[in-house]
Amino acid sequence: MTLKIPVVRDILAANERLAEDNRRIFRQAGLFVINLMSGPGAGKTSLLERTIDALRQEIRMGVIEGDIQSSYDAERIGQKGVQVVQLNTGGSCHLDGNMIKSSLDALDLGNLDLLMVENVGNLVCPAEFNLGEDMKAMILSVAEGDDKPLKYPLMFQESRVLLINKIDLLPYVECDVGKMRERALQLNADLEIFEVSCRTGEGLDSWADWLRQRVSDRKAELDGAKT
Ligand SMILES: Nc1nc2c(ncn2[C@@H]2O[C@H](COP(=O)(O)OP(=O)(O)OP(=O)(O)O)[C@@H](O)[C@H]2O)c(=O)[nH]1
Ligand SMILES: [Mg+2]
């Protein structure tokens, strides 16, 4: 046990340095970067598909797909005609700064406004590793239950946004969205919460508006720095 603690600390410190390198690269390219996390199947790729459809006329979006194995999600995103890279972690339950760094040469960052990173489906580990992102966003679907903030607190604490997805399923599952919101806000009072359905499209306009504003703030920040 006494041996294990410093090792973990060293790994996180090394990751932090790599995340900082990535952050510098993203800033230079004028990119806004989101690290999208959730348990398996909550709807990350579906949200990306919907977000690309909503914003493609005004925002140049790129995607890094993180999975333990397969290029299935990258193929789904590729069909939308945006820049996409698939990272396979080969067993690891999360992306880290080094993996992101290794994928950047495959993207034309100068031709992007927004980079979305879909992390490996896992409700715990991805929240421990910064990638150099501007913010973390998480999805929790109503099918997973309103108790999840109580049991998996870290991701809620680390995220800036919580998307409560699959609200079209509310008539069929036992989930109190009020309780889910309350429990999440108890962990992180600053969470921005959107209730959405990637199936019906409900609630996604508000999410797209919010995202549009973040990208435009980043552009204004950059223009301000130049003058
Ligand atoms: N009913 C319903 N189904 C949804 C919704 N969003 C996604 N799904 C379905 O949920 C399943 C998983 O969606 P994905 O978008 O692949 O989820 P993911 O989080 O990317 O999954 P992993 O990458 O495997 O972790 C698919 O069958 C989707 O069609 C929704 O709002 N409502
Ligand atoms: Mg996916």
Image: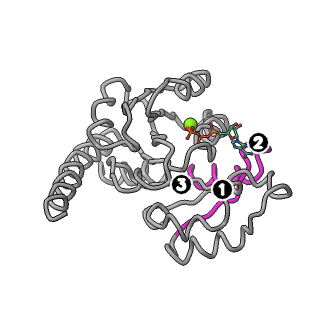
Which residue corresponds to the image point at 72% horizontal and 67% vertical from the top-left? 177
Cα–Cα gap, marks 3 and 1:
13 Å
Cα separation, mark 1 vs mark 2, equals 16 Å
Q: Are marks 2 and 3 in contact (CB under 8 Å)?
A: no
How many numbered marks appear?
Answer: 3
- Looking at the rendered structure, the kind of residue marked 1 is Glu
Q: Report the residue at 41% width, 43% height from top.
A: 93
Is 9 a magenta residue?
no
Can residue 11 be seen here? yes
Q: Say which mark, if any, is on residue 144.
A: 1
Q: Judge by depth and name the residue closer to the eye, 194 or 166.
A: 166
Q: Say if mark 1 contacts mark 2, CB within 8 Å.
A: no
Q: Secondary structure at mark 3?
A: strand
Q: If you read the primary sequence from the N terminus, does the residue marked by circle 3 or circle 1 appear first?
A: 3
- Residue bounds of the magenta highlight: 191-211
- Name the secondary structure under disc 1: helix
Residue 131, disc = none
Q: Is residue 47 left or right of residue 96?
A: right
Left/right placement of residue 225 relative to residue 17 reads right
Q: Is residue 195 magenta?
A: yes
Disc with the residue nearer the chain's start (1 vs 2): 1
Quickly name the residue at label 2. 199
User: Are there few (<14), some (14-19), or many (20+) residues within 10 Å of tag 2?
Assistant: some
Query: Taking 154 as reference, is 212 left or right?
Result: right
* Displayed quadrant of residue 79: top right
User: Alpha carbon of mark 2 to alpha carbon of mark 3: how far?
Assistant: 18 Å
Q: Which residue is mark 3?
A: 138
Of labels 2 and 3, earlier in sequence is 3
